[in-house]
């Protein structure tokens, strides 16, 4: 049979990161590519005990259908956490459990975006989100990420030049892929601009807890008195990504419509992982667990940066994040990091070319993203040395 692919999907391409994962899964490769949490941090024993207890003591609840909006005790537990830790108000807002943070972004897009509507994104930005917007034939417009977040002036210019703007998508804290964090001043300005122009802000915050020094920036949602922000959170980076448990906090009216869209997509997020996350949050101190994450990632980030200082050409610049999982590098000039990636792959080192994160993914890009969370110190040092040698060869140093 010959298939005629829909217009909506015919131009869609699989994530370059997912393609790289196929190679990175080979232990002979040094992967500086993915956004995976460190596997040694997974609470394997605790989750195994929780799952065993659930399946033996409460199998019907664990294996039966659940409600679309999510397991109620888990929703209430997350509410408590967000009120206490993030100062997020639930006056006019509601919460829904999603199948990872990615689904939340896609469901909001499904609910709001018509073909041809404009979605504004940081540039560079998370490919999972940009592909979600592309899948609904949205017009993507980028605003460059600066050291302290997108420029309010640049944002206003983009808004003035475009029509039917439905969404502004931002990752304000330890942005993926840049690692940069939006300043408090810019967070306030971005929220006010969105409010003034009746644009929904999707605040994606999967890395907010992974601050190396323990200091956290207020979320945009915590300042949202006009119900202009949908907040996307996830347990993928702080418990385990394979559980696929995320959540959305958004205006009640929007959550109600998103629930209808979710019923079409998957009926409800798998109930067993929801129960496992709830039991973990109830029985264990998540903050103590997160501290171990912060400690390891701060160390590995430091190891990578020191290796880059030693082995990278002087022309290559890079961010020095205070948290999260990523470092953004730029060769500057007429270079294409897709070609660099091909040469590094021959040496069994993989990373993600910068074009992956751009609005125009086909354009030449001199930047690239590195991840420091999954490799040991020794493999980070080895991988950066190999990458540095390839960069020097290509750049003629």
Image (spheres, rainbow, N blue to C red):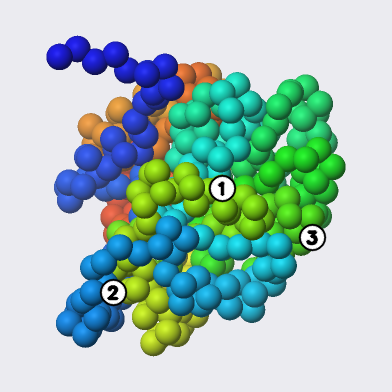
Residue 376, position in %: x, y? 30, 61
Q: Nearer the viewer, residue 153 or 229?
A: 229
Residue 14, position in %: x, y? 34, 31
Residue receiving disc 2: 61
Q: CA distance from mark 3 to mark 1?
A: 21 Å
User: In the rendered structure, which disc, 3 or 2, sits on the residue that comes first in sequence?
Assistant: 2
Q: Residues within 10 Å of mark 2 (few under 14, many from 20)?
A: some
| Dot 2: element | helix
Residue receiving disc 3: 225
Work out which quarter of the rendered image holds the N terminus and state it.
Answer: top left
Q: Nearer the viewer, residue 191 or 322?
A: 191
- 3 and 2 marks in contact (CB < 8 Å): no
Residue at image point 56% right, 47% down: 257
Residue at image point 26% right, 72% down: 62
Callout in the foreground (3, 2): 2
Q: Residues within 10 Å of mark 1 (few under 14, many from 20)?
A: some
Work out which quarter of the rendered image holds the C terminus and state it.
Answer: top left
Residue 267, position in %: x, y? 36, 52
Residue receiving disc 1: 257
| Dot 1: element | helix
Residue 237 visible in the snapshot? no
Callout in the foreground (3, 1): 1
Left or right of 27? Residue 164 is right
Left or right of 53? Residue 66 is right
User: In the rendered structure, which disc, 3 or 1, sits on the residue that comes first in sequence?
Assistant: 3
Is 56 situated above or below 377? below
Is 14 situated above or below 44? above
Residue at image point 73% right, 40% down: 199
| Dot 3: element | loop
Q: Residues within 10 Å of mark 3 (few under 14, many from 20)?
A: some
Q: CA distance from mark 2 to mark 1?
A: 26 Å
Is 21 situated above or below 116? below
């Amino acid at each position: 049979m010959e298939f005629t692919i829909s217009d909506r999907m015919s131009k869609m391409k699989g994530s370059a990161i997912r393609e790289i994962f196929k190679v990175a899964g080979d232990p002979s490769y040094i992967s500086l590519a993915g956004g995976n949490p460190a596997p040694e941090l997974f609470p394997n024993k605790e989750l195994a005990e929780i799952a065993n207890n659930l399946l033996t003591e409460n199998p019907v609840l664990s294996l039966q259908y659940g409600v679309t909006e999510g397991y109620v005790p888990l929703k209430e537990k997350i509410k408590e956490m967000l009120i206490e830790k993030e100062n997020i108000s639930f006056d006019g807002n509601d919460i829904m459990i999603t199948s990872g943070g990615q689904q939340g972004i896609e469901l909001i897009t499904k609910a709001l975006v018509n073909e041809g509507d404009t979605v504004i994104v940081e540039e560079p930005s998370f490919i999972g989100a940009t592909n979600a917007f592309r899948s609904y034939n949205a017009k993507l417009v980028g605003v460059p990420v600066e050291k302290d977040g997108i420029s309010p002036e640049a944002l206003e210019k983009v808004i003035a030049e475009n029509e039917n703007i439905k969404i502004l998508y931002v990752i304000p804290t330890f942005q993926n892929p840049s690692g940069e964090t939006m300043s408090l001043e810019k967070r306030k300005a971005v929220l006010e601009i969105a409010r003034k122009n009746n644009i929904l802000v999707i605040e994606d915050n999967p890395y907010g807890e992974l601050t190396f020094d323990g200091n956290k920036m207020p979320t945009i949602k915590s300042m949202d008195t006009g119900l202009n922000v949908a907040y996307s959170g996830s347990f993928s980076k702080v418990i385990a990504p394979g559980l696929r448990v995320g959540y959305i906090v958004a205006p009640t009216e929007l959550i109600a419509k998103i629930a209808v869209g979710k019923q079409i997509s998957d009926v409800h997020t798998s109930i067993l992982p929801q129960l496992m996350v709830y039991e973990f949050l109830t029985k264990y101190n998540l903050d103590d667990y997160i501290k171990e994450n912060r400690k390891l990632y701060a160390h590995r980030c430091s190891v990578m940066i020191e290796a880059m200082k030693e082995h990278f050409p002087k022309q290559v610049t890079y961010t020095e994040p205070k948290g999260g999982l990523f470092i953004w590098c730029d060769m500057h000039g007429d270079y294409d990091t897709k070609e660099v990636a091909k040469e590094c792959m021959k040496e069994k080192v993989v990373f993600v070319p910068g074009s992956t994160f751009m609005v125009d993914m086909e354009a030449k890009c001199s930047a690239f993203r590195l991840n420091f969370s999954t490799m040991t110190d020794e493999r980070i040092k080895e991988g950066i040395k190999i990458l540095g040698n390839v960069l020097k060869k290509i750049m003629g140093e």
